[in-house]
């Protein structure tokens, strides 16, 4: 069982490595070969996951663990890594391999003869590896690895149509939000190592999910839980970090479905469900999850009704449902949240993939009805005065001003730091005066020269 678990998680990574190697060697496989290889990979992953599920049920095992090699050690302290699968992990892993396989089958036709066909499928496999590492990791340490892989593939697929500037700008915006929020996860892992001496689930969480208890309590539990909430809110586009979600719709429809309808946006819910015992030990953190989820659900509903395109409207619908899932997690309804995640991921994926044909069907229905299809939600509007309706519409149209807030208080500072570092890198890479004029005593340190900008072509 341990070997089968390792093979299931490693399979997408091996395919990504193989595709990367053939690309480095200058060979571009045919579309049919890539699609068949993708189908076979996720057919194997689905079958092996079902075998693991049946074996767990047959042997009445609450979980399966597969120890991996130790990352590194310092004195008596060591970072051990392992794969772990229980009821929670099994659900997320199973829905991941099924939906990624379906997205691969859909994309083989949707992206037919697209210039970036090979690149899309390579990133799809890398994304699957990152997702499976998140859901099947045996510690928060290994979860961070998958978390970062999912983040970078998300950014690269948002910028998939790189010949246009808008997808690239949107991808950079999303990257900034991800990096800022991921600090919460990294600091939480460091705090866990200092407080509990380990970030392994086996030492932090006692018992079988969902009836687990936390080894971290008191103020430490509150600190860790709040840091994890920041990371989960960023990955799941919860308020106040939801401004990046419409920008993510610049990517292809299949990647929008698998990232922002099915799997990636639910990574935050998995993190909170996995850390549910820590949340339960902190009433402050539980209350914060409920408040964030409730505000996000209301914001997503309002913004979605003011959207002018189908994909963005579906993205905000996803945001609303994930906000409700956050509320369920905050109240401790773990099984309800898990069932909600499965149903929402499956239905939202179908809606994203069907969005182009759905618009066509709507136009046909609108014509058949003589242009008399009534808009929805009029009964809600009748309950509010006209002035409040206009104010709410402006707020929804600007999507809660979240982009402005993030640009001013978060991303603006990060971008300025990045620009300073980029300038320093250009100066460092400029020709050294000592190298051009040996023996000169006025050579400047650090490779800087007055004409560094001209030498590097900078503005």
Image: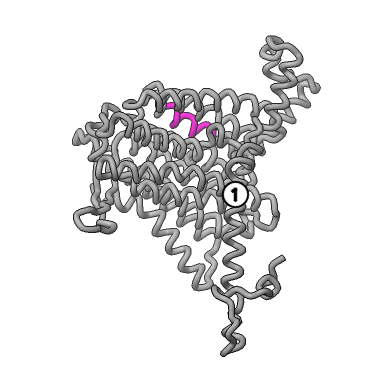
**Magenta span: chief secondary structure:** helix
Residue depicted at x 69% and y 58%: 163
Q: Viewed as shown, does residue 434 lie left or right of 337?
A: right
In the rendered view, tell whether residue 16 sits above or below residue 197: below
- Residue 161 seen in render: yes
84 or 282: which is nearer to us?
282
Q: Judging from the image, what secondary structure is the residue with disc 1 in? A: helix
Q: Viewed as shown, does residue 394 lie left or right of 134?
A: right
Residue depicted at x 55% and y 55%: 120
| Residue found farthest to the top | 383
**Location of residue 285 in the rendering, given as x and y in whole percent from the top left corner:** 40, 28
Bounds of the magenta span? 339-348
* Residue 340 falls within the magenta-colored stretch: yes
Quadrant assignment for the C terminus: bottom right
286 or 340: which is nearer to us?
286
90 or 318: which is nearer to us?
318
**Location of residue 123 in the rendering, given as x and y in whole percent from the top left corner:** 51, 55
* Residue 269 falls within the magenta-colored stretch: no
Residue depicted at x 29% and y 47%: 83
In the rendered view, tell whether residue 284 sits above or below residue 185: above
Density class for disc 1 (Cα within 10 Å; few <14, some 14-19, many ≥20) is many
**Location of residue 412 in the rendering, given as x and y in whole percent from the top left corner:** 62, 46
| Residue found farthest to the right | 370
Residue wearing tag 1: 158
Residue depicted at x 22% and y 31%: 207
Q: Viewed as shown, does residue 102 lie left or right of 81?
A: right
- Residue 361 seen in render: no
């Amino acid at each position: 069982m341990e070997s089968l678990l390792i093979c299931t998680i490693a399979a997408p990574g091996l395919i990504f490595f193989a595709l990367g190697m053939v690309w480095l060697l200058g060979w571009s496989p045919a579309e049919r070969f890539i699609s068949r290889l993708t189908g076979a990979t996720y057919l194997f992953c689905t079958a092996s996951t079902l075998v693991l599920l049946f074996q767990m049920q047959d042997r009445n095992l609450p979980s399966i663990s597969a120890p991996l090699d130790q990352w590194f050690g310092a004195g008596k302290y060591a970072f051990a890594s392992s794969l772990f699968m229980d009821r929670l992990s099994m659900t997320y892993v199973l829905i991941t391999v099924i939906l990624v396989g379906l997205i691969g089958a859909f994309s083989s036709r949707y992206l037919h003869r697209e210039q970036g066909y090979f690149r899309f499928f390579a990133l799809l496999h890398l994304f699957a590896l990152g997702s499976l590492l998140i859901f099947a990791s045996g510690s928060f340490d290994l979860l961070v690895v998958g978390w970062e892989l999912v983040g970078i593939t998300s950014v690269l697929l948002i910028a998939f149509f790189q010949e246009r500037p808008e997808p690239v700008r949107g991808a950079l915006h999303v990257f900034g939000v991800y990096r800022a929020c991921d600090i919460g996860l990294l600091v939480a892992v460091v705090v866990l190592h200092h407080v509990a001496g380990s970030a392994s689930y086996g030492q932090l969480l006692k018992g079988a999910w969902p009836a687990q208890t936390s080894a971290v309590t008191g103020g430490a539990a509150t600190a860790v839980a709040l840091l994890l909430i920041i990371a989960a809110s960023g990955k799941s586009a919860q308020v106040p970090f939801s401004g990046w979600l419409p920008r993510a719709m610049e990517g292809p429809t299949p990647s929008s479905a698998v990232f922002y309808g099915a799997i990636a946006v639910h990574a935050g819910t998995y993190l909170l469900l996995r850390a549910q015992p820590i949340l339960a030990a902190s009433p402050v953190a539980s209350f914060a999850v409920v408040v964030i989820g409730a505000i996000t659900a209301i914001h997503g509903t309002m913004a979605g009704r003011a959207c002018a395109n189908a994909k963005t409207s579906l993205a905000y619908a996803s945001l609303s449902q994930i906000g409700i899932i956050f509320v369920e997690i905050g109240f401790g309804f773990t099984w309800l949240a898990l069932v909600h995640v499965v149903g929402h991921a499956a239905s939202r994926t179908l809606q994203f993939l069907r969005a182009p044909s759905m618009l066509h069907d709507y136009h046909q229905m609108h014509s058949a009805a003589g242009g008399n299809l009534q808009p929805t939600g009029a009964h809600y509007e009748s309950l509010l005065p006209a002035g409040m309706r206009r104010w709410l519409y402006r707020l929804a149209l600007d999507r809660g001003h979240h982009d402005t807030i993030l640009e001013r208080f978060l991303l603006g500072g990060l971008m300025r730091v990045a620009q300073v570092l980029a300038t320093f890198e250009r100066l460092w890479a400029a020709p050294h005066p000592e190298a051009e004029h040996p023996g000169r005593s006025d050579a400047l340190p650090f490779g800087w020269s007055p004409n560094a900008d001209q030498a590097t072509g900078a503005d």
